[in-house]
Image (cartoon, rainbow, N blue to C red):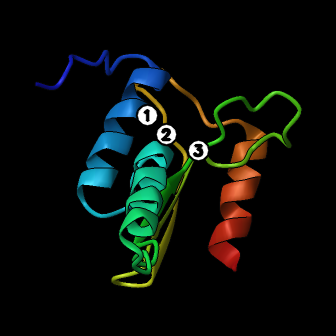
């Protein structure tokens, strides 16, 4: 059973996007990845390579401003996505806009 998420808040919206991204192969939570590693070790087999990663900075205090909320990596189709998430009321700051433009350029 999936718990209800408040999509009107940025944290709720981000949790929703992360859940969908992971369902679509953009990584598994770190705790689940650790269990895969431990199980492989238990059975004496090589663990599978990481298929995807959904990364977000949990506490951005002290980090450079403007970095996108999510970085998504998926091995299957060799894709890398940066996502800046905003609710209907959210606004992109000048610094976020500059970082997005830089990432698009490269």
Q: Which mark is residue 4?
A: none
- Whether pointer 1 and pointer 3 mark residues with C-beta atoms closer than 8 Å, the reply is yes
Q: Secondary structure at mark 1?
A: helix
**8 is higher (above) or lower (below) than 45:** above
Residue appearing at x 68%, y 63% in the figure: 101
The image quarter containing residue 2 is top left
Count neighbours of disc 1 (C-alpha within 10 A) and say few if under 14, some if 14 to 19, many if 20 or more: many
Residue 7 visible to the viewer: yes
Q: Which mark is residue 85?
A: 2
Q: Disc 2 to disc 1, how far (Cα)?
A: 7 Å
Residue 27 visible to the viewer: no
| Disc nearest the viewer among 2 and 1 | 1
| Disc nearest the viewer among 3 and 2 | 3
**Mark found first going from the N terminus, 1 or 3:** 1
Residue appearing at x 63%, y 48% in the figure: 68
Count neighbours of disc 3 (C-alpha within 10 A) and say few if under 14, some if 14 to 19, many if 20 or more: some
Residue appearing at x 44%, y 80% in the figure: 46
Query: Where residue 54 sits: x, y (%)?
Result: 48, 54
Q: Disc 1 to disc 3, how far (Cα)?
A: 9 Å
- Whether pointer 2 and pointer 1 mark residues with C-beta atoms closer than 8 Å, the reply is yes
Query: Where residue 41 sits: x, y (%)?
Result: 46, 67
Residue appearing at x 69%, y 76% in the figure: 105
Q: How many marks?
A: 3
**Mark found first going from the N terminus, 2 or 1:** 1
Q: Which mark is residue 56?
A: 3
Identify the residue position indicated by label 1 in the image.
14
Q: Secondary structure at mark 3?
A: loop
**Mark found first going from the N terminus, 3 or 2:** 3
């Amino acid at each position: 059973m999936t718990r209800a998420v408040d999509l009107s808040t940025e944290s709720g919206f981000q949790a929703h996007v992360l859940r969908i991204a992971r369902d679509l192969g953009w990584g598994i939570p770190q705790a689940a990845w650790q269990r895969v590693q431990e199980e492989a070790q238990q059975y004496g087999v090589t663990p599978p390579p990481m298929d995807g990663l959904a990364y977000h900075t949990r506490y951005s205090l002290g980090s450079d401003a403007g970095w996108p909320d999510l970085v998504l990596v998926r091995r299957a189709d060799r894709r890398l996505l940066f996502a800046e998430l905003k609710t209907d009321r959210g606004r992109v700051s000048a610094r976020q806009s500059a970082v997005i433009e830089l990432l698009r350029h490269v």
